[in-house]
Image (cartoon, rainbow, N blue to C red):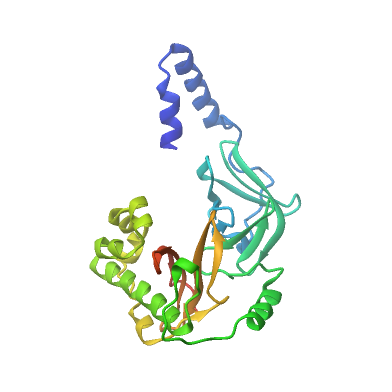
Amino acid sequence: MKNFVGKIFVGRSAKYNVLLVLCLFAFVGMGCFGSGKSKDAKPIPAAFLGDWQGQDGSTLSIRADGTGDYHSGGKKVDGGTAEVNEADKTVSITFFGIGETLKIDSPPQGDTMKLNGITYKRKGGFNVTDSNTSSDNKSENSNKKEKTTSTTKSNAAKYEVPGDEEMQEMTRQALLDFNDAVQGGDFTDFHSTISKTWQKQTTPERFNQVFSEFISKKVDISGVGSRDAEYSPDPAVEMDKGAKKLIAKGCYATSPRPVKFVLKWIPEAKEWKLFGIEVDTTESSC
């Protein structure tokens, strides 16, 4: 809202000032750009609530109070009105009538839904395979790859997937380094462990901002140090935003709550170096 008002006040002509006054006056009575939520709007179905990540990098947040956010490329709507119209099969996030409306191709099934042809997965605890193909993918993965152990490290330069022991150690170490940063309230050391490419794109301060809630609540995931991760699907090298990455998704069945994660690595020389991390401790089970 501050950005929106700021842009309007950039123009100082009497004409724009008068229009602004008239607009604000109309908004008090009936809504300047149209009312926020339509009269026929129904409560948002619980299945749609939460923070969603699209396969194309877009993000969608739908909250129980009827507000939401949508980011996709240059499009950004923050704190807009969220509506789910199951009759028209649409999800909309609008701000004073301006925003984005997405077609519901497949409604939420667990933590996955499809909008405008894009698969969205709920962040902080979502199914890592598309709902339409999860069973097929699981059976295919189980036939394609058997668990292996090896004392030889994988060659990241050749995009080799690490054996189980190495993969477990890489996953565990990344999360323990992350946990040390959270407990100390400082991501400086963690920042030094990630890939040099990622170091150039972000800062320790940015990590502090993104994971501020973990720091303030002193979320402790040190329990992963004594367990093995449960991967689903198996770690694999995949194309991700135009580049090959080693991606591991899974969960540690720690107590009192499990630790779910998504980790990504890229090659630097012959080693895999961390290039992405998501951690969730809000779910009650893996």
Answer with left or right where residue 254 lies relative to residue 231.
left
Determine whether 88 is above or below 237 in the image.
Answer: above
Residue at x 52% of width, y 40% of height: 74
Residue 48 drawn above or below residue 15: below
**Percent position (x, y) of residue 117?**
69, 53
Res 178 → quadrant: bottom left
Residue 90: % across, % down:
69, 50
Asked whether, in this view, residue 259 is left or right of residue 37, the answer is left
Front position in the image: 246 or 52: 246
Q: How many marks?
A: 0
- Classify 183 as above or below 205: below
For the question of whether residue 285 can be seen, the reply is: no
Residue 53 in percent (x, y) is at 55, 58
> Which residue is painted at 65% across and 61% down in the image?
113
Q: Position of residue 46 (x, y in %)?
A: 61, 63
Q: Quadrant of residue 276?
A: bottom left
Q: Residue furthest toward the right?
A: 87
Query: Considering depth in this image, is 48 or 187 the residue closer to the camera?
Result: 187
Residue at figure coordinates x 64%, y 78% from the top left: 141
Residue name at image x 41 percent, y 23 percent:
9
Residue 45 vs residue 72, the one in the foreground = 72
125 on left or right of 268? right
Q: Looking at the picture, does residue 18 appear above or below residue 198?
A: above
| The N terminus: image quadrant | top left
* Residue 128, quarter of the rendered image: bottom right
Residue 95 in sight here: yes
